[in-house]
Amino acid sequence: MAQAQPIVDIDQLYALLSLHNHALLLPQGDIRTLESVLDISLSGQIANNVGWLPFEGDRWPVYGLDAGLNPCSKLPETQRLCVLLSIEGGYFGLLCQNSATLSGSAVRIRPLPTAMIKPGSPLRGLALYGDRVGLVSTAEALAIFLGVGVGLLSP
Amino acid sequence: MAEATAWIMNLDGGLRTAVGEREMMHLVETPVFADIPQTPLHCQQVLLWEGELLPVMDLTAWMTGQPLERAQACVGIVGWQDHPGALPQYGALLFSGRPEKVRVKDGQVCDLPERPSGWEIVAISCFSHDGQPVPILDVPLIFSETLVTRH
């Protein structure tokens, strides 16, 4: 395992999502829009999702994660914001407490240490911003982790 | 007869292990960890050290299935090179209490303990100290993907 050099891209913007006591960083370009959890329909749940979000004439699955970043089937009480993420073929929503934008110049990204890579994990790296540690992922990685299938994107 | 210096660390469950003196870079007696979800049971935290995020290796968890008790947890920052001239790599080893620095002679070499069976994977040799076997860790291996795939 070569010592990874930090990835510092001052032109990159990151969305910083608060999930329980974790900070999840996603490329800002993966974010399509932010919606209120009040806009989510809870009927017709399938697989891991907690509900559906209407957007651009279709309905898109919405997912919640618990403190261990495991999918949960119920709407987490503290998460009132739905972040709609773009993937090939459509979108899916991820619930969180709040969202902020972080400049690439303010964060140092490291690959996840080899010893910490768990098969199937959505994590792609770790981030240092200030004295805080964040989790780095992408919409695509989360979609794979959550089992978001193109055929299920919009029933 | 050749001698070398080693650091003996206590794991839970009466287990002890050692690393060479040159591998132990620093001791952190009151470590502050950041929990990282969706990671293996034996490596679920990182430690911020010298501006780097180091994986915290809990060998007790890997060997026994139970995480080390954090009440008296201490961390040793270990370093290694994958090959001569390579950039140094660093990791954090989790153990209990303070480590013990000892001199080890060739004549103290002994067989690995039969239990737990994991010593065959993580240890490169073993020496006897106070009548007990102390496996010497293969530091580069334990911070590789090996412990994830051979859990």
Image (cartoon, rainbow, N blue to C red):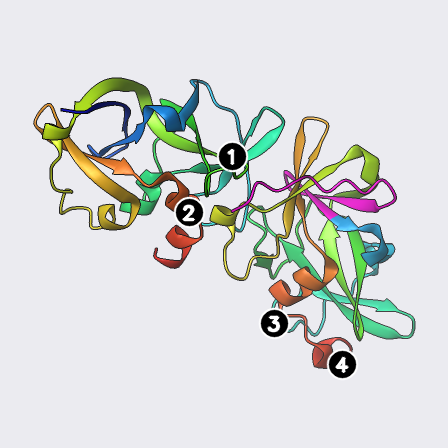
Q: Residues within 10 Å of mark 1 (few under 14, many from 20)?
A: some
Q: Name the residue at 71% across, 81% down.
A: A151
Between disc 2 and disc 4, the foreground one is 2
Residue A12 is inside the magenta segment? yes
Mark 3 vs mark 4: tell me if same chain. Answer: yes
Circle 3 is placed at which residue position?
Answer: A47
Circle 3 — which element? Answer: loop
Q: Name the residue at 86% across, 75% down.
A: A58
Kind of residue at badge 2? Leu
Mark 3 vs mark 2: tell me if same chain. Answer: no
Image quarter (top left, top right, bottom left or bottom right) of the C terminus of chain B? bottom left
Residue A121 vertical position relative to residue B109 in the rendered view, above or below: below
Picture quadrant of residue B137: top left
Kind of residue at badge 3? Ala
Q: Name the residue at 61% across, 72% down.
A: A47
Q: Chain of mark 2?
A: B
Expressed as whole percent of the image width and height from the top left, the position of residue B72 reads 35, 22
Q: Residues within 10 Å of mark 3 (few under 14, many from 20)?
A: few
Kind of residue at badge 4? Pro
Q: Earlier in the sequence, mark 3 or mark 4?
A: 3
Residue A103 vertical position relative to residue A94 in the rendered view, above or below: above
- Residue contact between numbered discs 3 and 4, judged by CB atoms under 8 Å: no
Disc 3 from disc 4: Cα separation = 13 Å
Tag shown at residue B41: 2
Circle 4 is placed at which residue position?
Answer: A155
Tag shown at residue B88: 1
